[in-house]
């Protein structure tokens, strides 16, 4: 990042603006904390406990966590709906909740609630006005987006008559009205049918291809795994891990599954027993033997053995931990440490 | 990188306030209760005519008084209803999430809500006035400048009461906001009576408390001056009424209270979390 006024020729504001514009990070969150007090008993509730992460420009970032993990609270802080107790956020190099930062973001709230007496065109016109777009741009963008999210036929209906999926699409359209650099989507696929979920996933990838940064929260593992370039797992108000899907699941090899085709006379023979012996599990269907080796086993040595016994190698597939297993383990770990901490308190 | 429109500067700010105001106007215009209130105002004017007929040679006086009182009362009640309902419902229904996440300042949102409400209330007061004028006209009573001034004052009162309601709504539930706003409306209307009562309680702490308390309450009786004494002179829409200078001063007074209340509401709203 450039230092402000490094060349001495720029005014401080111009230099700061330039520094912000060249930041490689679309979103930077540092040490975010949010503490509530319950209304009557004034019990302290820590919704966020030092959440820190960053999102590079042009990436799809999945924010994964169970219900009540702090996903929505983090997003609401990002969008200026909630003031953090501590920590800071920046979007495209601009501090939040500044107007400039918010002008670069499109936001789809969780379970979008919109003015149900408006039509989708009126909703987009309102969004466009708040973003400071002129009338011609508002009309053009609204027409483009209504077509893009497939609400052309329903454009004259009030939002009151929309289904959940249609409302979600209207919400996506209003989030894109300002042609944002960063799109923040809170549970965008929640409550949608499989077709709707697929459409949302495709739209997210389309946005990434157009150079946008997409930050979305979800508790639907398959959605996150399918489209996210990077994932952060959040539980009990803390980031448990962050990385690419491969980094998260590839760190622990669970074993290797090998499928062999045995020689015609090898079935039920010593050769089969020799091949099954070193494996953690083995099962034979017709002339194919499927074996699972432990992670620490020497695959090359096993393949040499198979070759020596006349078996043909059909496939060798390393078995990693699934995202679901990683997720569940980290949630369980967070729950255990949280319970221990609460026990100490 | 995407070319972004400018979000800074007074013109952009006015644009956002206007966007919220227009939307609020749309929303309020769909509230059916308002049409019920309009019917009530017309009914109160009809009642005024009936009461006028029952009085002896006071038909016009009664019709005007009851008509103006109806506009002031129902207008103020409508202002309280809209003030406590419209801001709260944005938070309760979470429609505010998609709004304040955009580059709009919270004070712009509060001012926009108020402006939209003020537009609705202005249309309502105009309709109330028109209904009164038509009914009085049907009885052969010509519109007078005094009644026009009284209407302008009633309008200013209604807008001030709306700001009071918005103020309470910025930090409290609709029920409590309604109670507080009604209480302040009643106190504001009774300021001369409270002053007079406090003056008679000499030698106690009551006058001092009353003086401080009245400084914190908008003097709403200034807007319904007909039938009261002003600088030792009785003023009435039926005879000698206030001049335009007084009306302008009262409007200025109301505007200052409105600005102060909206500024306080904005500060309170600024600190709120929207969960």
Image: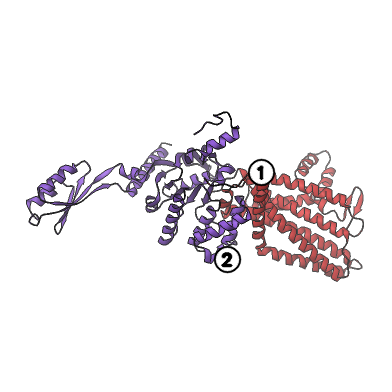
- Name the colouring of the figure: by chain
Image quadrant holding the C terminus of chain A, namely top left
The residue to which callout 1 is attached is B9
Q: Colour of chain A?
A: purple
**Left or right of A262: which side holds B95?**
right
Q: Is residue A119 visible?
A: yes
- In the image, what residue occupies the spot 57% across and 54% down? B95
**Left or right of A25: which side holds A264?**
left
Q: Which mark is residue A156?
A: 2
| Mark closer to the observer (2, 1) | 1
* Residue B60, placed above or below residue A335: below
Judging from the image, what secondary structure is the residue with disc 1 in? Answer: loop
Q: Colour of chain B?
A: red
Judging from the image, what secondary structure is the residue with disc 2 in? Answer: loop
Closer-to-camera residue (B44/A180): A180
Numbered disc 2: what chain? A
Quadrant of the image occupied by residue A267: bottom left
Disc 2 vs disc 1: Cβ atoms closer than 8 Å? no
- In the image, what residue occupies the spot 84% across and 61% down? B65
Q: Which mark is residue A159?
A: none
Q: Residues within 10 Å of mark 1 (few under 14, many from 20)?
A: few
């Amino acid at each position: 990042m450039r230092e402000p006024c490094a060349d001495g020729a720029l005014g401080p504001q111009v230099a700061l603006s330039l520094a912000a514009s060249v930041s490689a990070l679309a979103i930077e969150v540092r040490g975010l904390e949010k503490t509530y007090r319950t209304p009557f008993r004034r019990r302290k509730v820590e919704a966020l406990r030092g959440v820190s992460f960053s999102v590079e420009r042009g990436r799809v970032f999945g924010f994964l966590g169970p219900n009540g993990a702090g996903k929505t609270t983090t997003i609401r802080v990002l969008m200026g709906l909630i003031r953090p107790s501590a920590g800071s956020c920046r979007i495209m190099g601009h501090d939040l909740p500044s107007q400039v930062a918010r002008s670069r973001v499109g936001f789809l709230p969780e379970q979008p609630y919109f003015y149900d007496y408006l039509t989708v065109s009126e909703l987009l016109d309102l969004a466009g006005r708040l973003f400071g777009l002129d009338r011609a741009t508002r009309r053009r963008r609204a027409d483009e987006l209504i077509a893009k999210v497939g609400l052309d036929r329903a454009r004259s209906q009030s939002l009151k008559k929309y289904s959940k999926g249609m409302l979600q699409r209207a919400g996506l359209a209003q989030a894109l009205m300002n042609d944002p650099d960063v799109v923040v989507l809170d549970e965008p696929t929640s409550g949608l049918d499989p077709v709707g979920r697929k459409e949302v996933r495709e739209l997210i990838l389309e946005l990434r291809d157009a150079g946008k940064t997409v930050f979305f929260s979800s508790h639907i593992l398959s959605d996150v795994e399918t489209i996210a370039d990077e994932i952060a797992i959040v539980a009990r108000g803390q980031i448990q891990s962050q990385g690419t899907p491969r980094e998260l699941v590839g760190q622990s090899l669970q074993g290797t599954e090998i499928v062999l085709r045995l020689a015609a006379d090898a079935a039920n023979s010593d050769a089969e027993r020799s091949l099954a012996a070193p494996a953690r599990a083995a099962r034979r269907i017709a002339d194919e033997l499927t074996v699972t080796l432990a992670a620490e086993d020497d695959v090359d040595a096993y393949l040499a053995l198979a070759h020596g016994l006349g078996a043909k190698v059909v496939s060798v597939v390393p078995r990693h931990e699934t995202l679901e297993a990683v997720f569940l383990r980290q949630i369980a770990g967070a729950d255990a440490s949280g319970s221990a901490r609460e026990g100490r308190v | 990188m995407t070319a972004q429109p400018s979000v800074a500067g007074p013109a952009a700010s006015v644009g956002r306030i206007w966007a919220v105001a227009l939307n609020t106007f749309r929303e309020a215009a769909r509230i059916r209760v308002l049409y019920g209130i309009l019917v009530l105002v017309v009914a109160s004017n009809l009642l005024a005519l009936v009461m006028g007929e029952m009085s002896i040679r006071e038909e016009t006086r009664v019709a005007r008084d009851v008509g103006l009182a109806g506009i002031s009362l129902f207008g103020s009640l409508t202002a309280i209803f809209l003030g406590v309902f419209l801001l709260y419902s944005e938070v309760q229904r979470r429609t505010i999430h998609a709004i304040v996440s955009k580059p709009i300042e919270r004070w712009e949102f509060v001012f926009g809500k108020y402006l939209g409400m003020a537009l609705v209330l202005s249309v309502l007061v105009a309709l109330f006035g028109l209904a009164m004028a038509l009914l009085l006209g049907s009885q052969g009573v010509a519109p007078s400048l005094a009644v026009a001034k009284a209407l302008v004052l009633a309008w200013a009162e209604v807008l001030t009461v709306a700001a009071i309601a918005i103020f309470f709504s910025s930090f409290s539930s609709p029920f409590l906001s309604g109670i507080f706003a009604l209480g302040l409306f009643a106190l504001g209307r009774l300021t001369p009576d409270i002053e007079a009562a406090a003056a008679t309680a000499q030698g106690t702490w009551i006058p001092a408390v009353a003086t401080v308390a009245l400084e914190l309450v908008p003097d709403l009786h200034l807007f319904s001056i007909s039938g009261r004494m002003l600088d030792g002179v009785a003023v009435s829409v039926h005879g000698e009424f206030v001049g335009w200078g007084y009306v302008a001063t009262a409007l200025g007074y109301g505007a200052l209270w409105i600005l102060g209340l909206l500024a306080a509401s904005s500060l309170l709203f600024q600190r709120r979390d929207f969960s």
